[in-house]
Amino acid sequence: MSTSLSSTPVSGSGPEGGERHASWLELFFDLIAVAGVGQLAHLLHEGTSWTSLGEYVLLFLAFWFAWVMATMYGNVAGERTRVLAVVAAMFGMAVMASAVPGVHESDEKARAFALAYIVVRLIASRVFSGRGQIVADLPIIQLGAGLTPWVVSLWVHGDARLWLWAAGLLIDMAVMVRVTHETLQADIDQKWARAEVRAMRWFRHEERRSAARPPGEARARVEHTRSRMRQKPQVVAADVEHLSERLGLFVLIVLGEGLVQSVSAASEEPWDGGVRAVGAGVFVVLVLVWSLALRTGAYGLPLLVPRALPVRLLLLLHCLFAGAVAALAVALGRAVEEAGGTMPQSGRLLLAGVLALVLVTALVCALVSGWGARWAAGAIGPALVVVGVLALGPGARDPEGLGTVVSMVLAVLALAWPVAWRAYRPGTPAAGTAGTAPRA
């Protein structure tokens, strides 16, 4: 047996059929998520114009898609995961992360980002094609229509390049929403039936041609023809328990960025009463997000119960939530910087906006999990009202806005409410029953 880097399976994924945990390779691979999230978060650090927000959303989506494709490979392949494929994807994502600063201004960095993204996508597609598998829970791995605009963008300059990237990502998200396990299997069955008809015609033709040859040569020719007939692709699904752990780890990485941003800001400020109060508030906010997503949720999503959604849809929700929490990290770091005074309107709106996204995600997760509309409204409605107060500020009487300490108190209240509601009004969700994750 070969023991080269390209063919060595990964150990530590757990026995087949048993409980699996993240392997050392997967944890090593997640280091690139640490670096990438840090680079992406800094896009919002200097300002929150519509341009910077759009650029952040665009690049975060691309980076997250690259991460989840490599993660899905390890999830499905298990102990047969190839080290070289994962390391190559990790290097491609490192190039993407390195190119984030200045990607809008530099043609060289933009091409490097796009090319690295294309390569990571091709690696993911190639490893599954080599295994004869199609992943129903992440159909964009092999349905690569969304990759075409990225390829075209290699020869385009300026804002048009970014619009092409956006078009490619929108195509991918549409595929994730529309292509179900059943439609994918039906499409494969239909294509395979046509391919079998063509193959049998070719096979009979070869048999007739070989009839006049010596028996040994004819048999060898027939066997060669048989060997060229490919096996039917197998539609596979994710290991949902292992995937839940991997998605939760990504949320932990994003929360870690919040700690990095706030600690870095606090280290450069004089430790007066404002910094101490805001710093404590920042820490409580991060704890509350952790509790909401990882103690009262599943797959790193707040208030979601296991198996409430098809994997392909919960992946899109996870991307939204993780992107919001990464932006929250920036808002918290900026709050520490402004701890002694009034939070600027841009910083307050960023904080309110990402808190609203976190809460809306929790609301959607609660509804699809079967908690009921009244329970979900009670858990999230008051928190959204608090976020609205944070966003609007004190109004015309004080155009400078809310003090940073008051803003942080409101942020804590907004997140503490659903956590307390879940603890003291547990309810009984209708979804999330034992069994296989939904396929539809």
Image (spheres, rainbow, N blue to C red):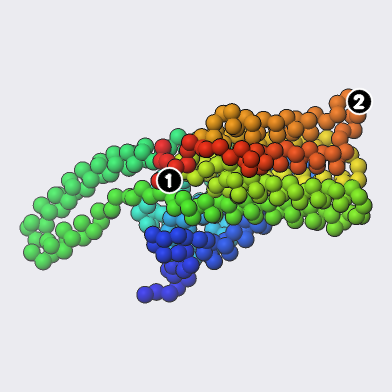
Name the image quarter holding the C terminus: top left
**x and y percent of residue 285 in the render?**
73, 46
What residue would you read off at disc 1? 434
User: Residue placed at 89% from the left, 29% from the top?
Assistant: 399
- In what element is the residue under mark 2? helix
Q: Is residue 80 above or below residue 230?
A: below
For the residue pair 146 and 439, the one nearer the viewer reads as 439
Mark 1 crowdedness (10 Å alpha carbons): few <14, some 14-19, many ≥20: few
Report the side of 341 relative to 64 (left or right). Answer: right
From this viewpoint, is residue 51 visible?
Answer: no
The earlier-in-sequence mark between 1 and 2 is 2
User: Residue placed at 54% from the left, 66% from the top?
Assistant: 24
- In what element is the residue under mark 1? loop
What residue would you read off at disc 2? 397
The number of numbered badges drawn on the structure is: 2
Q: Tell whether label 2 touches label 1 (CB within 8 Å).
A: no
User: Residue placed at 39% from the left, 53% from the top?
Assistant: 129
Q: Is residue 248 above or below residue 219?
A: above
Q: Nearer the viewer, mark 1 or mark 2?
A: 1
User: Residue placed at 18% from the left, 60% from the top?
Assistant: 223
For the residue pair 385 and 425, the one nearer the viewer reads as 425
**Mark 1 residue type:** Ala
For the residue pair 418 and 437, the one nearer the viewer reads as 418
Mark 2 crowdedness (10 Å alpha carbons): few <14, some 14-19, many ≥20: few
**Mark 2 residue type:** Arg
